[in-house]
Image: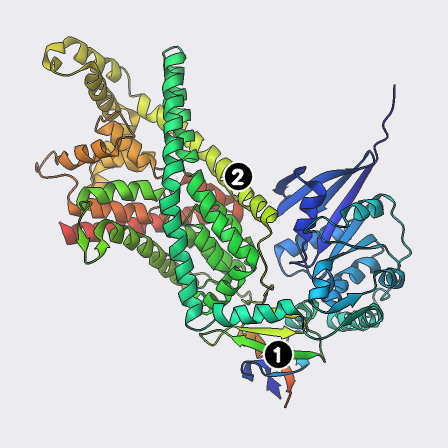
Amino acid sequence: MSVVEKKLFNVLLVGNPNTGKSTLFNSLTGLNQKVGNFPGVTVDKKSGTFKVNNQVVNIIDLPGTYSLAPNSEDEKVTNQYILEAKNDEIIVVVADVTNLKRNLLLLTQIMDLGKKVVLVLNMMDLLQKNNQEVNVEKLSKLLGISVIPINAHIGKGVDELKNAIVHFKANPVKFIEKDSLANAVDETMLRYGKINEIVNQCFSSKGEGKTSVLTKKIDNILTHKFYGYLIFLSILFTIFQAIFSWSSYPMELIEKGFLLLGNWLGNTLSQGILNDLIVNGIVAGLSGIFVFVPQITMLFAFIVVLEDTGYMSRVSFLMDRILRQFGLNGKSIIPLLSSTACAVPAIMSTRTITNLKERLITIMVAPLISCSARIPVYTLLIGLIISKDSSWGVFNLQGLLMMGLYLIGFIAALGAAWVMKKLIKSKEKSSFIMEMPIYRMPRWKNVGLSIYSKVQVFLFDAGKIIVAISIVLWVLSSYGPSNTFEKIEEKYAVETNNYSSLSEKEINHLISAEKLEASYAGIIGKTIEPLIQPIGFDWKIGISLVTSFAAREVFVGTMATLYSVGDEENTMSIREKMMNAKNAETGEKLYSTATTMSLLLFYAFAMQCMATLAVVYRETKSIKWPLIQLTYMGVLAYLSSFIVYHIFA
Amino acid sequence: MTTLDQLIENESGTICNICDEQLALQLLTMGFILGEEIKVERIAPLHDPMIITSGCNCLSIRKKDAKLIEINKAS
């Protein structure tokens, strides 16, 4: 029996933000990595493993930080991990070699704690472009630790780093005796003094670098007082244009795939409750999630690329003054944009906002921005009141109304933010101190992994709730009190003569519509009818409002069942049935302009997404905020629907 | 004493004092060192915030915070 010796090394990866730390982490671990959460806090924990000669190394990628004086929740985590690092753990400090002085500050702080440290000099490829030179051997000698020059981008120097980790040796110098100075500012100045001595001996720079000159030139255009905003708006416009035209094809494909799967399962499995649960509960729920993947992936792809190039920092810079008026922060622009895809990952991306009040307000208003799940609802309803060809000048009226709904969501978000700014008390200072990285080409591997993790959040975090709710709703709409369902079937079996002109399929559709009316969901719909009548809704819409809690687009499917269309894919026929629907009392058209406009606004404003509420609960660690959100959005939706209904009625 | 918020684009000076300890420490750790050169690179179209640089460090800051940074303006 051969024994393979496996020794475990633990490595912590730390460094300033924007030093290519994540790129290095990715090239060290490849796909052997997972994203989790640090216990007790909402900070992403990236950990992974790699092997060097039969030895397994565990590595944790800690959030970027400038020093051991933390300013945010992220930085506190890093700080804690460094302070608690054990004697056999190695801390790898990643430094941007082109900005050595500042990057060495964190290094000297960690070295003075007596921890085992290896220094990595990243961005070696930029040295020449910047007219800079560094003497790595001398730096290593002066610091008394291993210094590994790498180019994480192409993986150069990664093997040398692995070796330095498993064959660790060091004879570190001491920078500052502990407790010699009480004042943190003075201590930092003293550190910089010592760092300067070292840097002057092994680093030289001749004039300004090419990259920063290029960045200035690009900034002249992208943050221009007029062109800056114009370019941002054009980029937004292009993104939406692209998403609407590119995502429809894969979306149809996914819908068809799930329909085939559902039909196949329905025919293969033995008939009964389980069959119905799988086909109409689970598969329908899954289909409702996966259909949004193309759109959400594309939106996040654009956002992540813009972030990676450095452009998003400039957008935040341009927007800070405006957003500040509404109690938000320049950094809120990324979560707000992400909300057009899905509020769940958007709310998670508010973690970069360090001011608690600003972060809360961003979380509270983000779901007012129209997300992907509202599009199918908007499309169906707009088709009811505006014909496809009507136009206003060169603009298509349907498109104009769609754009109006997006705009009104955005305006409502700003308005709600402004009110909350007045209501929420906070003594915490608000600031906008944010590093402006140089522009660079997107690092595609990072971009890919980042998109992947955001889509994963949507699929799993939002997905599991959507499926769970779908099952609950399936129960509510498949069962009714006592034997009401049997009675309906008996009725159709007995009175066959009355329906002789209809095919069996059509009769089945009638039966399922009547069953839905008699089900618990139908009862709920009828119970809330008095409440929603003032905004022009009947019990059928009431049922849809309830089922929409899984995800808003379920509205379309519920309407299909209620109007016994059967075939959900055929939106034309749902539309026709809805157009012909009459108000039971007055006999007038049910989906009048008034009711439809009221319904559109209700879907724009109401908090009908269980998955979002769950993520708000997780991020704020309190039941209070999701409840406030549910209430204020509900009231806003009801009031605006009421007003619009009475204007058009 | 001149404060940083009084500078216009492309004007520079040296950092003398930062009148808020927390801000001083944050800026220091981000590479803005007392006694070194600081420059206003760009002011946002709506006159706030601004982008400032020191060496190869570049960050955005609101005028409210810039007011706390005392400088010796370069002539």
Q: Residue at x 65, y 38 (%)?
A: A31
Residue A214: where, in percent of width, then height? 59, 68
Neighbourhood count class around disc 1 (C-alpha, 10 Å): few under 14, some 14–19, many 20 upward = many
Viewed as shown, does residue A199 lie left or right of A266? right
Let me know if marks 2 and 1 both belong to one chain.
Answer: no
**What is the residue that sits farthest to the top in this orientation?**
A494
Q: Residues within 10 Å of mark 2 (few under 14, many from 20)?
A: some
Q: Is residue A540 left or right of residue A308?
A: left
Res. A138 in view: yes
Q: Could you say which quadrant of the image residue A202 lies in?
A: bottom right
Q: Is residue A176 left or right of residue A318?
A: right
Extreme residue toward the right, this view: A171
Chain letter, disc 1 residue:
B
For residue A207, what is the image quadrant? bottom right
Query: Residue A456's mark?
Result: 2
- Real-space Cα separation, disc 2 to disc 1, in angstroms: 43 Å
Q: Amino acid at mark 1?
A: Lys
Residue A62 appears in the figure? no
* Residue A442 place in picture, x, y as percent: 57, 54
Q: Is residue A165 left or right of residue A253?
A: right
Residue drawn at x 40%, y 27% as measured from the top left: A257
Residue drawn at (48%, 59%) of the image: A332
User: Label 2 sits on what residue type?
Assistant: Gln
Which corner quadrant holds the N terminus of chain A? Answer: top right
Q: Does residue B38 lie above or below A48 as drawn?
A: below
Locate residue A33, reporting x and y percent: 66, 39
| Chain of the residue that carries numbered disc 2 in the rendered image | A
Reading the image, the residue beneath label 1 is B39
Position above or below: A521 against A311: above
Looking at the rendered structure, the secondary structure element under dot 2 is helix
